[in-house]
Amino acid sequence: MNNYDLIVIGGGASGMMAAGCAASLGKRVLLIEKNRTLGDKLRISGGGRCNITNAIYDTRLLLSNYGDGAQFLFSPFSQFGVKETFDFFEKRGLPLVVQARNRVFPSTEKSNDVVNTLISYMREGKVVVKLGTEVKKILHKKGEILGVVAGRDTYTARSYLFATGGVSHPETGSTGDGFNWLSDLGHTVKTPTPTIVPLATSEEWSHILAGVSLSFMRITFFQNKLDEVGSVAKKCFSKTGKILFTHFGLSGPLILNSAGKVGDLLQEGTVTAHIDAYPDTNTGALDSQITKVFDANKNKMLKNILKEIVPEGLTPGIIILLKDIDLDKKVHSVTKEERRIIVDTLKCLPVTIINLMGYDRAVVADGGITLSEIDTKTMRSKLFSNLFVTGDLLHINRPSGGYSLQLCWTTGFVAGSNA
Ligand SMILES: Cc1cc2nc3c(=O)[nH]c(=O)nc-3n(C[C@H](O)[C@H](O)[C@H](O)COP(=O)(O)OP(=O)(O)OC[C@H]3O[C@@H](n4cnc5c(N)ncnc54)[C@H](O)[C@@H]3O)c2cc1C
């Protein structure tokens, strides 16, 4: 049915960019999307604000955040990098602003505006969009894709582009279809595991703080190897930054970006962590600060001055952790030993990591097609001469902070220009 130059499967970030780009070059493009709306994952990105890139303009420096994918991405990013992302959106009437940690958002802070910009881009090029249409089968023969089957219809084109996304937040439509097709076609696909994902903890004190976020904390992870019963927990790594407490555990940039390593540690043993609520104050200095507060409030009840020594929002959790201290006692009768327990607790809030949360809560899941099977300059499959692959389908690790969407703009543009 119909002969197009290019069929794009998937109307997410990379698919819409690729479709619009190919159409702007005069190609007849069909985009097939199984949802009734375009860009559902894009709409929930960045909590609905859409962190669309990271303002690091030096390509090599930027790419150092893409792990083993850095070398592969050099050519695509030279064709369409951060500067081009700014130009693309700003020329289309959507100014961008740079916020903390170089994260870039639309000035309206509305992801809908990003989706609408891409829809307009496709409209300009007269991309034909078929919504509510799920591709079920890929037809192929001897290194060439021949068509795609959706319902009773078969659609054909000269080239095909898989932009069906990964497996995180499957309710947005990314259910891993592209991974299955690529495997069936003979490509090597690394099984996805959630990487940028919150952590589940077992302690009640952390759950009770759901909704509290603290911008400056240090978390240190420890591991007990399964085959070393009775061994001392080994310190593995620390990170400092923002932590968000949730009803199941921990989230926020610091946690999301630690999850990949924590997942590896969990494979080999139990993982615990200590959170330091005062990372820039050592134990002695914190003890002196607390002593001063105690001296100024000798006749008050201990529970009534906790808010002066505990970071804002943490008090309900700290009360649980200090269960062995009578908080109704007057400050003047707090013993030196009890004061030491308070200091140690604030420097060392204990959590046990049960596991990584699942795909339903992941921002990005690791996994995807092995890069050596994709041509770096064009995003073309090395096994199928008329197949292109973009976005979350590629096996590229990256942290949170706009790096995933930049990957979509870049690979979408490169594939769309070459398909
Ligand atoms: C909660 C959350 C927050 C995020 N926040 C950010 C952020 O702020 N910044 C950032 O850089 N990244 C963020 N990400 C990651 C980013 O959203 C993704 O990397 C990006 O959207 C992936 O785009 P994509 O084009 O690869 O695929 P997707 O956006 O997943 O689109 C794939 C599309 O293909 C369609 N599809 C799938 N199978 C079929 C089929 N068989 N037939 C037809 N259509 C099909 C799906 O319905 C879907 O619309 C976030 C992710 C999540 C889950």
Image: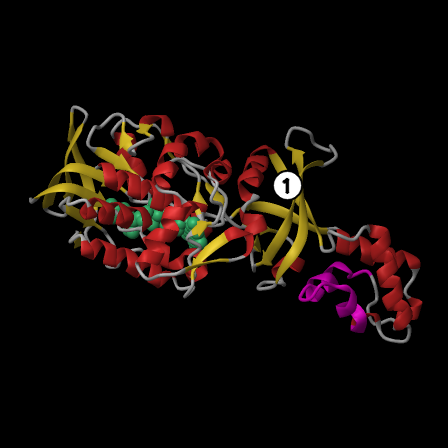
Say which of 291 and 177 sits in front: 291
In the rendered image, the vertical position of residue 60 relative to residue 21, given as above or below: above
The residue positioned farthest toward the top in the image shown: 142
Q: Residue at x 72, y 55 (%)?
A: 277
Secondary structure found at label 1: strand
Using residue 70 as the reference point, say whether residue 235 is left or right of it: right
Which residue position is annotated with label 1? 271
In the image, the residue with mark 1 has its CB under 8 Å from the nearest atom of ligand 1: no
Say which of 400 and 83 sits in front: 83
In the rendered image, the vertical position of residue 84 relative to residue 268, given as above or below: below
Percent x, y of residue 361: 46, 52
The magenta stretch spans which residues?
A: 304-324
In the rendered image, the vertical position of residue 254 relative to residue 376, given as above or below: below
Using residue 155 as the reference point, say whether residue 45 is left or right of it: right
Q: Residue at x 19, y 44 (%)?
A: 25
Q: Residue at x 80, y 53 (%)?
A: 344
Percent x, y of residue 265: 59, 36
Three-letter residue code for mark 1? Val
In the rendered image, the vertical position of residue 58 relative to residue 383, given as above or below: below
Q: Is residue 306 located in the magenta-colored stretch of the structure?
A: yes
Q: Quadrant of residue 95?
A: bottom left
Say which of 380 and 9 sits in front: 380
Q: Quadrant of residue 121?
A: bottom left
